[in-house]
Amino acid sequence: MASTPGAAFAVLPPGLTPGALSSATRRPLTARPTTTAPLRSLLHSRRRAAVPRRGATTMVAAGEARVATSAPGRLPTNVDGNVYVHDSCINCDVCRQMAPATFNAASGQSRVHTQPAVGTEAHVAALRALVSCPTGSIRMVDAAAASAAGGVRAAAATLPEALTAVGAPGVYRNGYTSRFSFGATSYTVVGSPSAADGGGGGGGAPPPPSVSYMVDSPRFSPVLAARLRATVAATGAPPLTYLLLTHKDDVCDHAKWADALGVRRVIHEADVTAAQGTGACEVILRGDGPWTLPGCGVKVIGTPGHTRGSLCFLDEAKGVLFSGDHLALAATPDGGRALGGFRRYTGHSWAVQIGSVAKLAAEPWTVLLPGHGRIWTAGGAAEREAEVAAAVERMERQH
């Protein structure tokens, strides 16, 4: 691994932790580890005690989605029809991002505002959201009504979802979010030029597709694992190489993904925890960075604040910045959206986070892909610099 002067790192073989992090025994990672991260506190404190037990449900194997045989707990804000949001909704925004033609917000939770017609793209998008909901809160009164167009299984087969429409070709939204990351979005990048190929810069023909990687960890699903393998293989790119972890909040099922796909997990040592088993990650970064991973043109930027070890990942060849919970197009008090952070959920230091956001203005990205919050696309370097500067000013007023 290469790094800039002053940046320290450790490349670890499987099962070996660096001396500073080693212990006589390491607690095994459970399938769904608990965490004390700030975003998780909202899930546990706000919703768990208030949510009634679910009605009868049936598991749909291909999509791992819950489909109701009746409609107890149906939120009254839903319009009439087959698809609905259950009152176990935690207001994570996943369905509203994935299927805005069907879902929006009302009274602090999501709801169906327009029933999608079976066989339309809106219907497929709604069922992708059903599969991806972290709490199984999107349901159907009659699952058979959707089967004529392939139903949930067909929708699951469209994941991961290509993000070409937002200016990020070769980047996919994985879906299958987890309640243990409060519905954080994870991504897969296929066919990014590697550092050995020159990172995609310069003239002449572009280099062949090489490095593929994931950013943050979705809920583990054998169905999604198979789809990710197939998506990568279809491009002619080599298999997925890395699982890049932006911070400790969004690492759910990381060990299962490493086992299933053979990826090397990357995390900063300040976000390593015994409870989450992240001491077993193959690459543990030390210092302030930036870092460059072996054979990968992705620049790893240290952006502490939200957590002590928060990282952003810049894929300059694709013009995308993966920001975790550090920076996003977030809701504002006046009901709009603007670039910013999530002051309420900062677990380390808001002042440090403001400084970390400021240094992203000069990095060469056009599309911002966060874990929470909305995707944002800049019109160019001038707009990016101006909007990041405005975000810093807003964040300073919250300090």
Image (cartoon, rainbow, N blue to C red):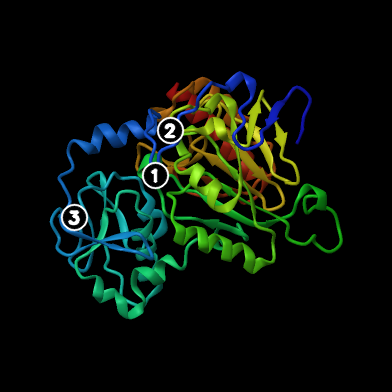
Q: Residue furthest right?
A: 204
Q: Is residue 40 left or right of residue 79?
A: right
- Which callout, 2 or 3, points at the residue further toward the start of the chain? 3
Disc marking residue 315: none
Residue on which disc 2 sits: 342
Q: Amino acid at mark 2?
A: Phe
- Let me know if residue 160 appears in the view: yes
What crowding class fits label 2: few (fewer than 14 Cα within 10 Å), some (14-19), or many (20 or more)?
A: some
Answer above or below: position of 161 versus 5: below
Residue 99 x/y as whole percent = 38, 61
Q: Residue at x 75, y 42 (%)?
A: 294
Residue sitting at x 57%, y 53%: 261
Contact between marks 2 and 1 (CB within 8 A): the answer is no
- Can you say which quadrant of the picture contains the N terminus? top right
Question: Which residue is under mark 1?
Answer: 336
Image quarter of the C terminus = top left
The disc, 3 or 1, on the residue closer to the chain's N-terminal end is 3
Mark 1 Cα within 10 Å, few/some/many (few <14, many 20+)?
A: few
Residue on which the image places disc 3: 77
**Residue 36 occupies quadrant:** top left
> The residue under label 3 is which amino acid type?
Thr
Residue 359: x %, y % from top left:
64, 30
Q: Earlier in the sequence, mark 2 or mark 1?
A: 1
Of residues 284 and 322, the one nearer the viewer is 284
The foreground one among 165 and 193 is: 193
Amino acid on which disc 1 is placed: Gly
Residue in the foreground of this view, choosing between 126 and 291: 291
Element type at marker 3?
loop
- Give the Cα distance between marks 2 and 3: 27 Å
